[in-house]
Amino acid sequence: MNSNEESPTGGVAFISFCDSGGMLHYVAGLQREIASHTRSLLVLVGNGSSPADLRFLLSSNRLVNRLLEKYNPAYYRCLARKLLDECKPSVVHITSSSIGLPFFIKQLQRGGAKVVYTVHDPDPHEEARSVWSRLMMRIENLANERALRLCDRIHVHSALHEKRLNERYDNVFSRKIYVSQHGCGITDAIIQGNRVPQELRDFPCGSDALVLLFFGRIEPYKGLDVLFDALASGGFSRRVVMIVAGHGNIPQPSSPLNAELISINRFVDDSEIQFLFNLADVVVLPYVSATQTGVIPLAYAFARPVIATKVGALPELVDDGATGFLVQGSDPEALRRSIECFAGDNDLARRMGEKALSYLDNRFGWSEITARHLKQYESMTAGTTLG
């Protein structure tokens, strides 16, 4: 926040302990839409350079100091007091997890703020972890359960998430859970971005190839190995180019691919995202397990259809046969057949993409999403001024 601007009183402060990638896209999009209805601001905790109304900088880039902050209850209490003093919000909406959330939430509530906590993934992802990582995950899960008990409302992205959360905690939190879809997290940096990724500077514009895009952080549960098996299992009616864009360990294909593979194996800057999605014909999400994703709404916003698996809440985001195709998870042949549908019909991706954009506007548009959030904010602050 600029020093010459007066801090707002009331309203909603959105806070994220993740200041890059999909989490940032989500909270920035949500805050922007809420701001058209009531006073709101975006608060980021981190050391990046992403735009925010207020940023709490980590004291040092040194690993030791950062760990001392992350696992220090006093650090979270201090953050809460600074947020209350500088922003004076009626509602604080926390949109990412952190191990110190119980201390953070209690301090906010002592200051009179109501707290909403967004749970993106009710079920932990299946990932290989070291003994130390598994121990820390156990501690973080305990902290997360405490945060759920303390907060005033719990926001989830789908009916499936609500069901899973109730099953996991024996309906203890059922009265304060509400559902509002993910929404499309397009930031100003994405909209205004025109940067061509270095790895694609030699890619011929106007190519007649079918261009597939896998986008996002690369983790085992996202099924890239299954996608590679699909691309190796048979030929296609025309040339296929597979772009894998994201940070993480890309698995080695077990067999030669019937497609050209282009890897952008790094964090993709917001300024490069528009070019990637405009270049792609179809976005592929071969996840073998998942709860939700912001990639599908992002694809729809660029009028791109998707091929997604029937895992988690993904089927709630795809109109099978209209905005893309749904296939069984871990089924390379089903993936291959869906890819061939697009390869065999040069106009199918465009037709489905138009339906995807309309589907986003009609089913997951921000007007409905913000209305659901505002209803909860107002119910928590009844008798007081929201903003």
Image: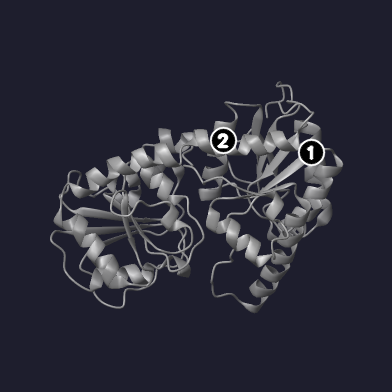
Number of callouts: 2
- Residue drawn at x 16%, y 59% is 239
Which residue is tagged 1? 113
Drawn side of residue 156 relative to residue 232, left or right: right
Q: Judge by depth and name the residue closer to the eye, 325 or 243.
A: 325
Q: Secondary structure at mark 2?
A: helix
Q: Is residue 100 visible?
A: no
Drawn side of residue 347 relative to residue 293, left or right: left
Q: Judge by depth and name the residue closer to the eye, 243 or 281.
A: 281
Q: Amino acid at mark 1?
A: Ala
Number of residues whose C-alpha sits closer than 10 Å to that of mark 2, classed few (under 14), some (14–19) or many (20 or more): many
Residue 104, x across and y down, in percent: 78, 49
Colour option used: one colour
Drawn side of residue 365 relative to residue 140, left or right: left
Residue 365, x across and y down, in percent: 46, 37
Q: Amino acid at mark 2?
A: Thr
User: Which numbered tag is attached to residue 370?
Assistant: 2
In space, the residues marked 2 and 1 are separated at their CA atoms by 20 Å
Q: Secondary structure at mark 1?
A: loop
When the figure is inspected, residue 23 is found, relative to residue 5, above or below; the finding is: below
